[in-house]
Image: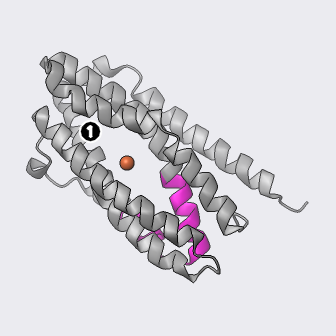
């Protein structure tokens, strides 16, 4: 049987859901983790936010090979936006005493980020798949990190000083940026997913 575009969407959705459910299950009960461990997770998450600017820059260059420049232009726009977001995240974390500069490198995060970097530099349709995956993951990431942020703010009694951090995640969840972006990528490129 020939695979259809709908099969591809369903397949991706199912794979995504399995991954998301597994990650969320591990972070459902935050009381089992120390405050230090939760702060460490936030600093590791920031690494993606920071590196994402480079992924988007590389992806924009790679997708310039498409006949249409719609994808390339959207990636350039998103890159400019994300550049601002990493700075916001960093400042919000600093307000709750998480200094991202004090972080020690964690090899698994380095490997994870370098793999995404590699995938962002492949042939254009593979890059499209990578962007689809990272943007889809963004929604659940912000859901999880909103809860983690609130938990840390509560435990450390940060009160209003934690407001920017909560807002940062709520801002992402409140918009439809990610889903719109993902559908724009697939629709405007006119390409099958594989
Ligand atoms: Fe963002």
Quadrant assignment for the N terminus: bottom right
Q: Quadrant of residue 142?
A: top left
x 65%, y 81%: residue: 67
Quadrant assignment for the C terminus: bottom right
User: Which of the two residues, 164 or 17, is positioned nearer the viewer here?
Assistant: 164
Q: Quadrant of residue 189?
A: bottom right
* Region in magenta: 113-134
Q: Position of residue 84 (x, y in %)?
A: 28, 54
Q: Which residue is mark 1?
A: 41
Magenta segment main secondary structure: helix
Q: Position of residue 35 (x, y in %)?
A: 18, 25
Relative to 188, say whether 16 is above or below.
above
Q: State whether residue 122 appears in this view.
A: no
Q: State whether residue 186 appears in this view.
A: yes
Q: Residue furthest right?
A: 1
Is 40 a magenta residue?
Answer: no
Q: Position of residue 81 (x, y in %)?
A: 36, 56
Left or right of residue 185: residue 158: left
Secondary structure, mark 1, is helix
Left or right of residue 90: residue 53: right
Q: How is the image coloured?
A: one colour
């Amino acid at each position: 049987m020939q695979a259809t575009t709908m099969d591809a969407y369903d397949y991706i959705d199912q794979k995504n859901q399995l991954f998301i459910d597994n990650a969320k299950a591990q972070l459902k009960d935050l009381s089992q983790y120390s405050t230090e461990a939760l702060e460490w997770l936030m600093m590791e998450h920031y690494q993606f936010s920071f590196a994402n600017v480079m992924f988007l820059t590389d992806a924009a260059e790679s997708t310039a090979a498409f006949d249409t420049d719609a994808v390339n232009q959207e990636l350039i726009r998103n890159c400019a936006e994300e550049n601002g977001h990493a700075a916001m995240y960093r400042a919000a974390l600093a307000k709750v005493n998480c200094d991202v500069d004090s972080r020690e490198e964690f090899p698994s995060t380095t490997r994870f980020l370098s793999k995404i970097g590699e995938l962002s530099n492949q042939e254009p349709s593979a890059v499209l798949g990578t962007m689809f995956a990272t943007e889809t993951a963004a929604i659940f990431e912000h859901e999880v990190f909103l809860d983690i942020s609130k938990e840390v703010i509560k435990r450390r009694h940060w009160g209003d000083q934690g407001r920017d951090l909560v807002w940062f995640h709520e801002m992402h969840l409140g918009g439809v940026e990610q889903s719109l972006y993902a559908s724009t990528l697939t629709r405007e490129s006119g390409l099958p997913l594989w």
